[in-house]
Image (cartoon, helix red, strand yellow):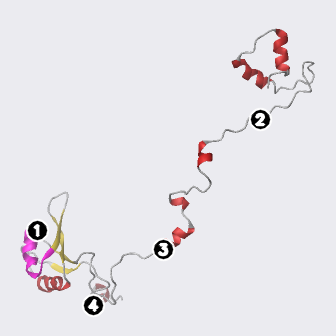
């Protein structure tokens, strides 16, 4: 753009050489209005703007590139999420005990703070094979929190343990044994009914 322009003519008339670093400065100066200057050549062609460089991402990736993440889901994906079939436990009608994923879980409350897993296992093992036994400890004191959860494979075994051991003594302390999960209220005459609520 400097060849034959007013700045080129000015530079050659004065006998100076245009260096590559000063070309940028001269190029910027060529935008100044020289209407009154007699060096200005009015027949000069207008300057063309340089084309924007094409990025590799605009060349290789088209507009059909699939976006991933929360904000780029199609409406179809959201509909399928809410109408899809999911794994669930069978739901019976009416109140009663509910089975967990692996078995029937019994909750034991009122457990003595110095009780061991062996004490609970001896008391409950005669009613069926215990699949799992959780006896939670207090992190601060190291003693039992006062409850335990036992898992039986069949409902008959769990029901036999509940019927036989509910209200009995374990290490000189009365324990309460009931179902851990239920589909609804287990008894109609619960605490809410005694207070006059439904």
Task: Please report the residue visible at 77 percent of the width from the left and 21 percent of the height from the top.
Answer: 26
Q: In this orientation, which residue lies closer to the viewer: 91 or 159? A: 91
Residue mark closest to the camera, 4 vs 3: 3
Task: Please report the residue visible at 81 percent of the width from the left and 24 percent of the height from the top.
Answer: 30
In 3D space, how far apart are the residues under numbered discs 4 and 1 (Cα atoms)?
33 Å
Q: Badge 4, how many Cα within 10 Å: few under 14, some, many 20+?
A: few
Magenta part of the chain? 113-130
Sequence-wise, the earlier of marks 4 and 1 is 1
**Residue 162 image position (x, y, % from top left):** 16, 83
**Residue 91 image position (x, y, % from top left):** 34, 84
Q: Badge 2, how many Cα within 10 Å: few under 14, some, many 20+?
A: few
Q: Is 50 displayed left or right of 104 in the figure?
A: right
- The quadrant holding residue 9 is top right
Task: Please report the residue visible at 81 percent of the width from the left and 31 percent of the height from the top.
Answer: 47
The answer to whether marks 4 and 1 mark residues whose Cβ atoms lie closer than 8 Å is: no
In 3D space, how far apart are the residues under numbered discs 1 and 2 (Cα atoms)?
84 Å
Task: Please report the residue visible at 61 percent of the width from the left and 52 percent of the height from the top.
Answer: 62
In 3D space, how far apart are the residues under numbered discs 4 and 3 (Cα atoms)?
38 Å
Q: Which residue is mark 3?
A: 82
Q: Which residue is mark 1?
A: 117
**Residue 109 image position (x, y, % from top left):** 18, 75
State whether residue 115 appears in this view. Answer: no
State whether residue 62 appears in this view. Answer: yes
Q: Which residue is mark 2?
A: 49
- In the picture, the quarter occupied by the N terminus is top right
Q: Which residue is mark 4?
A: 189
């Amino acid at each position: 753009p400097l060849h034959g322009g007013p700045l080129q003519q000015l530079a050659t008339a004065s006998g100076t050489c245009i260096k590559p670093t000063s070309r940028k400065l001269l190029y910027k100066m060529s935008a100044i209005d020289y209407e009154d200057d007699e060096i200005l050549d009015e027949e000069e062609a207008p300057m063309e703007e340089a084309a924007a460089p094409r990025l590799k991402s605009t060349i290789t990736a088209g507009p059909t590139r699939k976006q991933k993440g929360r904000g780029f889901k199609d409406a179809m994906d959201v509909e399928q999420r809410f109408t899809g079939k999911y794994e669930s436990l069978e739901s019976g009608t009416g109140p009663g005990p509910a089975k967990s994923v692996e078995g029937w879980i019994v909750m034991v409350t009122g457990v003595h703070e110095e009780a061991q897993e062996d004490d609970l296992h001896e008391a409950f093992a005669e009613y069926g094979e215990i699949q799992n036994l959780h006896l939670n400890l207090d992190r601060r004191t190291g003693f039992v929190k006062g409850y335990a959860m036992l898992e039986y494979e069949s409902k008959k075994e769990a029901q036999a343990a509940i019927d036989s051991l509910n209200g009995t003594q374990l290490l000189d302390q009365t324990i309460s044994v009931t179902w851990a999960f239920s589909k609804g209220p287990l008894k109609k005459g619960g605490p809410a009914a005694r207070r006059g609520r439904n």
